[in-house]
Image: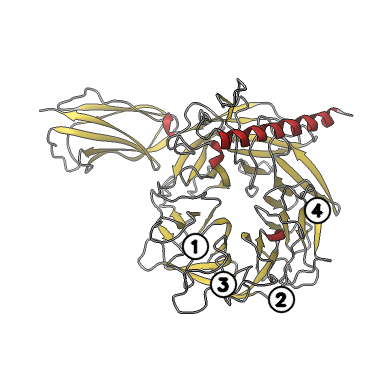
Amino acid sequence: MDLNFYLVQFNDFFFNLSQAYYQYFKYNNEGKMKNTLYGLLFITLIGSSLHSQGFKQIGVAPPYGDNFGGIELLGPEEKDASDAGRGLLAGTDLDNDGKIEVFVTSYADHKVYCFEQTITDTFALVWQSADNTTTDSHPRDIKTGDLDNDGTPEIIFFLGQTLGPDNPEAGLQVYEWDGTDNGYGDEPVFRADFYSVLNDSLSQLSVESFSVGDIDQDGKQELLVANNGNNAGILGTKDGSTTYSEDRFMILSVTGNFGEFGTTLVEEFAVSPRDHDKDGSIDSPFILGGGTPTDIIICDTDGDGLLEAACSSYNYLAIFFVEATGPDAYTLGATTVVGPAYPDDTFTLGLSAADMNGDGKDEVYLAGWFPEIGERPLYVIKDVDGDATNIDADTELSIVGTGAAYGCTAVPDFGVVVGGEPGKSDITLFELEGGNWTKSVHVLSDATSGWVFKISDAFDSDNDGNWEIGIPYQAVLDSVDTNNDGILDAVDPNENRVFRIVEWDENYVSVKNTTLILPSDYKLAQNYPNPFNPTTTISYTLPIENNITVNIYNFLGEHVATLVNNESQPAGTHDIVWNALDKNGTRVPTGTYIYELKYGNFSQTKRMTLLK
């Protein structure tokens, strides 16, 4: 037996051991984990030890350091690292500054965070979504788009689960770029709670995955939502029609422009896998497969130019298609459904569609996972009869290979990339060569816990012809038990990460350190002298070039003056003098004042005192 055999056996043993530790301490030592997750470092490491080609690791964040807590990615101290990394979007450049962005979700404080590549080998945390009072394990997915069709990109995600007056911040969240560098706003420009916006109100909105795109080709993007709601409709309808199951696939659009009065969501189409005819009675047997909606994506499986929504549910990986036949017009067609995992219950955490074989038709790929299904197959659905809404399980469904696990992304002329389990298969790659599929397993260094539930679409930020992919990790084990006493008492020496950026490479590469810039790297010094009269100097240090604003406020929080107004300044220490004049040039009264260093939607403040 060769070395690779022993490597696989060791990885299997170590992974199973680490997961057993994680589950035991997570549920038997709640609050005892040493939740330390900062000192963030990006590094480049060797890719797979099991394949001659591989993924090189070009970006990693965050390893465990000494600053876990506060605003930086994972939120309150009592939360642990398992609360981050459910969803990730990588490779965007919404503010058109030529710098790629990575968005990552966190359950801990129910936020989305944006990292941006500022200079070579350096990423900075540049934006976070607003504080909120929502509960439950969200957000789970994030997309970008232009839902109001005004030419300005938006950041889109969902918060909360239980809807209604007691949870007013739950629902759809939209942040819109304001035209400035990383200017995505401090608050959503639009919220929709789905409790009051729909005719058939929802009491529960739990969105594992969703899509944004112009599915009906009317020149305006739609929002496609897979909602895990209550099995039955319980709140009733506005127009008195029959309410039906809240487990729904919905296609919605926006009327109006964000920020303007009257802007709202309009339902173009909706269907429930539990109640296909919306008569208020759960189907028996299930016509559309039943189960909880997990994903909905846009594709063209029959190559006719009309786009479809592929809708997948938890139940046996049930999947069916809805075709957009014109503006705001949709056809369910024959109510046929394929449950490729039947009779074993299973789920998928991400469909993907692409024309991998070059026949002019998209195929749909889905990876199935459940403990009872040891092979964990990657399925593919290919249309052969020209009817996208009717799936023949005998001729249009097949297995690409086994050993898949969670979400996947299909990249033409490259392969289908599937997320896995650190220490075993961070990434599994299926490549189509000459009509045959081959599989390779790629284990990244220093990752021994967590799961890669979802994978970003591929991108090529440096235009070198090699695909890059963002992979998030959830349920990472941040601490270890060094004394074998049942208490996690030390930081994991492997420094597991919440997300990584990897790039396909034909050759192995050497280790390379990459820096991650955090808000704590910006330093605001105490003014000098303090107290002062008549002038004082404010000093601050920037870790990188950035647009900076320096404001003065009185003790009531009222704006007094702006000393630096969104000015691009180089890295280094800067001094600015305040002469105790307000924005109108009038001398201010004695008292306590607050000065603020602001960059993006992050800021630091200190107090100073003006004497007579």
Q: CA distance from mark 2 to mark 3?
A: 16 Å
Tell me the SS state at disc 2.
loop
Asked if disc 4 and disc 3 are in contact, CB closer than 8 Å, the reply is no
Give the percent coordinates (x, y) of residue 599.
38, 39
Residue identifier under label 3: 269
Residue found farthest to the bottom: 240
Which comes sooner in the sequence, label 2 or label 4? 2
Location of residue 6 (image quadrant): top right
Which comes sooner in the sequence, label 4 or label 3? 3
Residue identifier under label 4: 400
- The type of residue carrying mark 1 is Leu
Q: CA distance from mark 1 to mark 4?
A: 35 Å
Which disc number belongs to residue 147?
A: 1
Tell me the SS state at disc 3.
strand
Task: Give the side of residue 227 with respect to residue 261, left or right.
Answer: right
Q: Is 527 placed above or below 60 here?
A: above
Q: Is 248 placed above or below 557 here?
A: below
- The type of residue carrying mark 3 is Phe
> Image quadrant for the N terminus?
top right
